[in-house]
Image (cartoon, grey):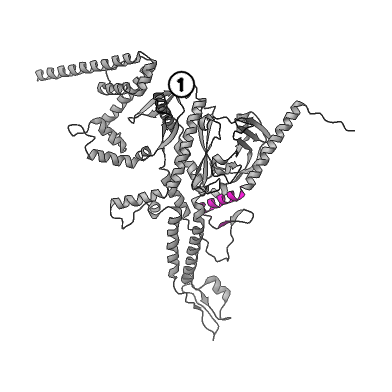
Amino acid sequence: MPKKRLLTPDSAARAAERELAASVVREYEKRREERRSVEAQWTLNACFLAGRQFAEIGPMLEVSDAPPDSPWEERQAYNHIAPIVETRLAKLAAVRPVMSVRPASGSDADLKTAEASGRILSAVTAKLDTDSVISRATMWSELTGSAFYKVTWDAAADDVAVTAVPPHEIYPDSLCAEGMDGVRVLIHARAVPVSVIEETYGVKVEPEDIELAAPERASFAALPDLMTVRRDDCALLIERYERPRPGAPEGELTIVAGGRVLHRGPLPYLNGRDGSRDFPFVKQDSLVTPGAFFGTSMIERAIPVQRAYNAVKNRKHEFMNRICCGVLAVEDGSVDVDELGESGLRPGSVVVYRQGSREPRMLDQGSVPAIFAAEEAKLEEEFNIITGVSDIMRSSSVPINAASGTAIQLLIDQDDTRLNITSDFIRAAVRDVSRMVLRLYKQFARGERLTRCVGEDGRVELISWKGSDIGECDVVYDTVAETANSRSARQSRLLELLRLGLLTGEDGTLDAATRHKLLAAFGYGSWETVAETQALHEAKADGENLAAAAGKRIEPSEIDDHVLHERSHIRYMLSAGFAEAAARDRGLERRMLEHVRTHRLMRALTADAEAGNAQQTDEQA
């Protein structure tokens, strides 16, 4: 009888690891097969966006160009989808919601915590360059209908990392879930160079010949060819996230590549509600599809109209070609048909036909039917109705019948309202991302951190904070602040305030500081050397405030503009940040008061010296 092979603990563990890795890969393959029809629609959207508008989805869910019905058929693409998408992206680029933090209660402690969290969020948002991440995610959501943000903690950089993830890499356990809350298990699969896998996980895996989405190489001009590419220096990295359940109260994260289990453990981030563990993903839709996980792109709705428009334009051009080139009618055997068909009736040519037969003649093709122009105009209007992008938005011109500024503004506002649904999805996604960012900083940020942010007076300042400063609070978006953040709206309000006389002094004139800020708001802040020097003095005074808060000794200089320094120091001493710093350092207020008194003394001495010099000059004169 053959001997039974005994499994050692190590071999049993390796077998269990291989089986776990194989089960994760099988689950990924199953979900990929279930999603083939959705991916085919994404590829078709990319084809129409890039101008390959005779593509269609075949019976096997492959996307290929349909063959022409006849060799002479006109097949030009008159791409209206690309400018529509570009216009929508340009309008949606202005949707950059300003986040504010709402305290958990009305107590002083919660109010201070919410204020600190808001300042931290404002500071780290600028540092993480979230605008470019939002733009990239919006591009993918406009193309496919959905995009995702992945919010993780980068241990190497000791900071939060926010990346835009295309939907090609996301595989939910149910395509019928209408949001992330309805997903129990989520897979994130992507091609990663084997060298990066080895550096990150310390495991060397063999390269695989895989075919996956390559968004980092994609562009509108070449999307259909680059939606899927083959890489021979990468391996398929599969991250399987499972929500907390009774058997696993902290959830589970399993990472697999090359048939190896690289990591298995609980969900790493306390990024859910009330400190729970959750997926590190936020979904952003262009338009919601009821009963479906992935959203709908505006391109999908415009494809039938684009097909009809191309057909009308091509048939119209075929008709015009017949009129211009003509159609010859010849009697059988009267001419050399091959030569006439090759050369046609060129100007000055001699046509020889058989004696007694009828000469070749051009058939009357009439004129282009008016129905072509009418149908073309109807389809152009249908583009506007379906996509929510009007002629005003696409051509950046106003109608001739809009004679007043109020009418023009009303038309622009109506165009903006047609994008409100998509804009609200962007705002909601950014709000959820901001919540995750704060929760990750609270979980991982250790030690004091210095970050630049914009203060209440609009000036850039440094704040010192740590993860424990972030409390239990909620993030909401401030639509009033977002509207005020628009450059054109801000300039219009400044001009209105200037006309009302609210920016001038009691004598009706603008002081130097106000004039400099007005010029800066309109992009001409560097025109005045005096104002530039003033900005340098203010920056130096701000640096002295930080140095004093850090316990360093500060001394006035003879070259200081004492008025500006006094104003900056007093503003700092009246701020909430100074109160917190003074509570930690009992001698800070005394040092700052002495510093301000020294500025005043030096200013008085300088004034006396200037007065004495003026009197001496008068006496000499």
Q: Residue at x 29, y 14 (%)?
A: 594
| Quadrant position of residue 276 | top right
Above or below, 544 relative to 368: above
Question: Residue at (43%, 66%) from the top-left corner?
Answer: 374
Q: Quadrant of residue 199?
A: top right
Residue 418 in percent (x, y) is at 41, 50
Residue 21 vs residue 348, the one in the foreground: 21
Instruction: Verify whether residue 513 appears in magenta.
Output: no
Regarding residue 209, the answer to whether it shows in the image is no
**Figure quadrant of the N terminus:** top right
What residue does disc 1 label?
Answer: 448
**Crowd tier of the residue under label 1, counting other residues whose Cα lies within 10 Å: few below 14, some 14–19, many 20 or above:** few
Horizontal and vertical percent position of residue 246: 62, 32
Q: Residue furthest bottom?
A: 356
The residue lying at 63 percent from left, 47 percent from top is 34
Residue 526 rendering spot, x and y as whole percentages: 30, 33
Residue 327 against residue 206 in the figure, above or below:
below
Magenta residues (range): 35-58
Position of 534 compared to 190: left or right?
left
Asked whether residue 43 is drawn in magenta, I would say: yes
Question: Is residue 265 or residue 501 the one in the foreground?
Answer: 265
**Residue 377 higher or lower than 549, as above or below:** below
Up/down of 42 relative to 548, above or below: below
Where disc 1 sits, the SS reads loop
